Image (tube, rainbow, N blue to C red):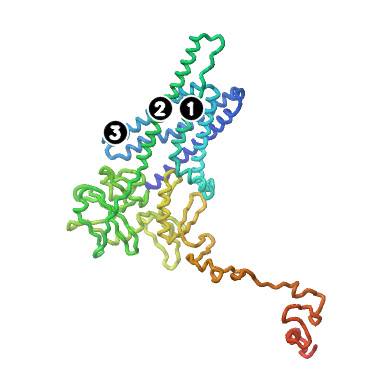
Amino acid sequence: MAAKQGTRNAVSREGFEGLMAFFAIISELILAGVLLGSSEKFMKRLGIFKKGVIINVLALTMYYGMEIWLIPVTTVLNVNNPFSAEMLIRMLGFATGLFIAVVGSWLIYHAAKSLNDKRLYTVFLIQVAALLIQQIIYLVQILMARGILPARYLIKVMAPVIDHQDWFIFIVFIVVFAVPAALFSQKCPARPAGCNPAQYRKIVADDIHKKRWGKASVGALIVMIILSSVGSAYANKKEELVPAVSVTAKDQMVSIDINKVNDGHLHRFAYRTKKGTQVRFIVVLKGGSAYGVGLDCCEICGPTGYIEREGQIVCKLCDVVMNKQTIGLPGGCNPIPVKYGVGNGQIRIEQKELDAARRAGYARVKIDGNMYDLDEEIALEKNIKHTVEIVVDRLAMRKGIRGRLADSLETALALTDGVAEVDVIDGECMTFSQNFACPEHGISISDLSPRLFSFNNPLGACEKCTGLGTFMRVDEERILPNRNLSIREGAIKASGWYYAEGSVAEMYYLGLGKKVRLYAGYSPSKR
């Protein structure tokens, strides 16, 4: 239920953001159209321009505002103790980032305000174009995920863009730099006619004051870039899983010494089933004599694993902090529980429990086109051939999924001997294969070998010429050059069939003629 609810919420949020992106695109197209016109047309369309600005501001506020104000919410959720030093540092980081963004925006506003009309139009048009491209890319992703646009053809173009979405924030900074750059390139006004030196000095001082806004905005942008770079590097820091300790079963039981896991830290183990599948599971002391034992995966994030960070158990994929007391209980992002017992100073897990867990936490399966939960009782007719498909993962197209998609695809291919399907919601199901076979047309070839490329071998030879480079065929024009002649008159010019008195060919023709007469019902002696 948690997975379904989470998916539903994600889809709802995605739809709302897509709608806001659509309104932003419409308003940005209006603004670009007005700005590309002449100054006279601009004054005539000033009312349309103002409405476009209002729509754009509202749409972008709703779009980016959700992302901004969800930061403190997720920060609170990912910290066990809201009054800890970690919580204080995170909230200070959020407040600092918000403060710098507000100050930077204020400085950029005053710098843009100091530009003349021509430069202001140009800078605003560049920024509108950058926003337009960004919103179009995001809207295309949503439409691809919903199956409205053909993902099969667009994914080749969109994949590099999705993989490098983090670069967009730096592109935004570069675009914003156009404001101070335009201000610095703006020349000081010439001395007007009839202006005394004191008045002109005031004009020069105003110009210098205006350019100070540009210098201040450049400083703010540099600070933002540094903080964003450091923050992005820290946020995207990869934490590797601690290698699992290999364990084996003895007398149908896997035993772990309590003294090795009673320190309250995360301990990871690996058990290999009879079929060779590795099953990772974790053991954590929750308190007293209670232990949390579960698979190194959950129903939501799959077999991505858990890490220990500052004494806390954290999901490697979604960065959600686990409450130790809930480890061993089903639901949410908790590790899928494994039954265990304690005795003789050991944690004992039945071998069949781990053998049954070789599904590696997969919660759903599709049988004959119908979806089932693996927790429920599934009755199948043993005399009927069934199609059984394990659901490895469920993904929504968004940034940061490339690694998870690759892992899920590798897992699916390993389970099915090289064949996997991607079932797109409201779209076409795509089949992928690692084998030398076409899953759509049922054509397959053997493993590549030199004989497949040799004309001297039937497997590699051309089917038409059999590897000779030439082929034999019958030319009717050469065999029967004159169709007005009879066989006795020499109509057939082929070697061995040319008619002549007393020749072998005459014997062939007489024999054939006799057979034809018998078949037609004539007397054999009749010539």
Name the residue located 31 percent from the left edge and 50 percent from the top edge.
Answer: 241
Label 2: element kind: helix
Dot 1: element: helix
Rendered location of residue 364, percent (x, y):
40, 54
Question: In the drawing, does residue 81 fall left or right of residue 224?
Answer: left
Q: Which residue is mark 3?
A: 88
CA–CA distance between discs 3 and 1?
A: 38 Å
Residue 52 spot, x, y in % from top left: 54, 29
Q: Position of residue 460 (x, y in %)?
A: 54, 68
Could you say which disc has been placed on residue 113 in the image?
none
The amino acid at mark 1 is Ala
User: In this rendering, which labeled residue sits more in front, label 3 or label 1?
Assistant: 1
For the residues bearing labels 2 and 3, Cβ distance under 8 angstroms:
no
Q: Which residue position is annotated with label 2?
A: 219
Other residues around mark 1 within 10 Å, as few (<14) / some (14–19) / many (≥20)? some
Query: Comparing marks 2 and 3, which lies closer to the viewer?
Result: 2
**Secondary structure of residue under mark 3:** helix
Q: Which residue is mark 1?
A: 181
Cα–Cα span, label 1 and label 2: 13 Å
Q: Nearer the viewer, residue 69 or 383?
A: 69
Measured Cα–Cα span from mark 2 to mark 3: 27 Å
Of mark 1 and mark 2, the one earlier in the sequence is 1
Looking at the picture, does residue 176 appear above or below residue 447? above
Depicted 376 relative to depicted 123: above or below: below
Q: Nearer the viewer, residue 51 or 464?
A: 464
Left or right of residue 67: residue 148:
right
- The quadrant in which residue 381 appears is bottom left
